[in-house]
């Protein structure tokens, strides 16, 4: 009986020993598989390099070394800092993890977006505003000055025609007020007849406006008895002169 119990105990201990050994082997095997898969997966993914400012051919060679492919988008984008024809943006971005044989898409630069300033000379401010507004520029400050050019016409601009500017840039203009009118000291016309003063006034550019007749007992008929503007006032050459003429003495 005792021998039988000892044999059973030895069998149980032996079973436990081999079961533990099998479990250990299984754990080691599982760990090896996990490590192997980790290594394999790691080898399948690579870090996306920085392609910005590269030409497409250079970007292609850079990606081929990592078993990646390049796709250049059909559209492009403006950039003030990146040369035309080189990579301006990419997806996935720099530093991203990407599986081998996958594709990195890039957008090339169109270079700096510059607009050629048109000539606004001779046109009106309204016309200039519409023209440059339609092309992405805007009207800036409007200055005025007397000149021999037609009134309200643009006689100078800044920037000059054909210069290149960024979208939204302002174009300042100088507008003509027309020739400066000559100033005179209004002569004294009282006591003279209309025929005596008409030619002199019209020669200086004055215009005779209303001519009214008024009874005035101390002046002969046809003599100027009142005027506006009054004598001695400063007037421009295109001033309108209104006169009152005596109807004569009774």
Image (cartoon, grey):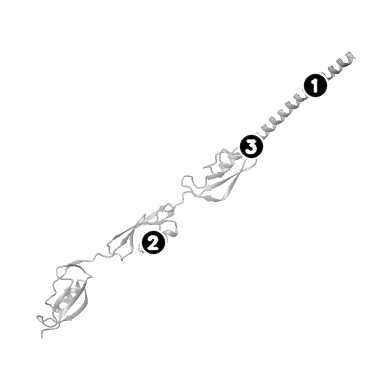
Query: Mark 3 sits on what residue?
Result: 45
Q: Quadrant of residue 137?
A: bottom left
Q: Distance of mark 2 from mark 1, alpha carbons?
A: 98 Å
The mark that comes first in sequence, 2 or 1, is 1
As drawn, which residue projects farthest toward the left? 218
Q: Where is residue 147 in the image (x, y as percent from the top left)?
A: 27, 62
Residue 6 versus residue 108 in the image, above or below: above
Closer to the camera in the image, 69 or 128: 128
Crowd tier of the residue under label 3, counting other residues whose Cα lies within 10 Å: few below 14, some 14–19, many 20 or above: some
Tally of marks: 3
Residue displayed at 71% across by 28% down:
31
Q: In this view, does 52 lie to the left or right of 208?
A: right
Q: Is residue 47 left or right of residue 78?
A: right
Q: In this view, does 93 lie to the left or right of 166?
A: right
Q: Where is residue 98 in the image (x, y as percent from the top left)?
A: 62, 39
Under circle 2, the secondary element is helix
Q: In which quarter of the image is residue 118?
A: bottom left
The mark that comes first in sequence, 2 or 3, is 3
- Whether residues under marks 2 and 1 lie with C-beta atoms below 8 angstroms apart, the answer is no
Quadrant of the frame with the N terminus:
top right
Q: Position of residue 130 (x, y in %)?
A: 41, 62
Query: Mark 2 sits on what residue?
Result: 128
Residue displayed at 38% across by 63% down:
126
Between disc 2 and disc 1, the foreground one is 1
Closer to the camera in the image, 84 or 47: 47
Mark identifier at residue 16? 1
Mark identifier at residue 94? none
Under circle 1, the secondary element is helix
């Amino acid at each position: 009986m005792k021998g039988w119990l000892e044999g059973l105990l030895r069998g149980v201990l032996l079973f436990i020993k081999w079961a533990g050994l099998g479990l250990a082997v299984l754990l080691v095997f599982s760990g090896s598989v996990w490590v192997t898969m980790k290594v394999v997966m790691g080898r399948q993914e690579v870090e996306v390099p920085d392609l910005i400012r590269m030409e497409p051919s250079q970007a292609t060679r850079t990606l081929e070394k990592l078993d990646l492919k390049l796709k250049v988008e059909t559209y492009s984008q403006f950039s003030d800092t990146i040369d035309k024809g080189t990579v301006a943006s990419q997806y996935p971005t720099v530093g991203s993890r990407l599986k081998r044989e996958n594709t990195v898409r890039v957008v090339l630069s169109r270079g700096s977006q510059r607009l050629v300033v048109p000539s606004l000379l001779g046109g009106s401010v309204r016309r200039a505003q519409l023209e440059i507004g339609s092309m992405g520029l805007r009207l800036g400050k409007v200055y005025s000055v007397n000149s021999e050019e037609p009134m309200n016409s643009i006689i100078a601009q800044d920037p000059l025609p054909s210069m290149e500017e960024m979208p939204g840039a302002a174009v300042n203009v100088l507008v003509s007020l027309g020739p400066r009118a000559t100033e005179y000291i209004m002569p004294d016309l009282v006591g003279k007849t209309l025929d005596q003063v008409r030619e002199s006034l019209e020669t200086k550019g004055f215009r005779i406006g209303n001519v009214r007749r008024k009874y005035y007992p101390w002046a002969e008929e046809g003599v100027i008895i009142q005027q506006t503007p009054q004598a001695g006032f400063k007037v421009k050459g295109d001033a309108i002169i209104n006169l009152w003429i005596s109807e004569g003495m009774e």
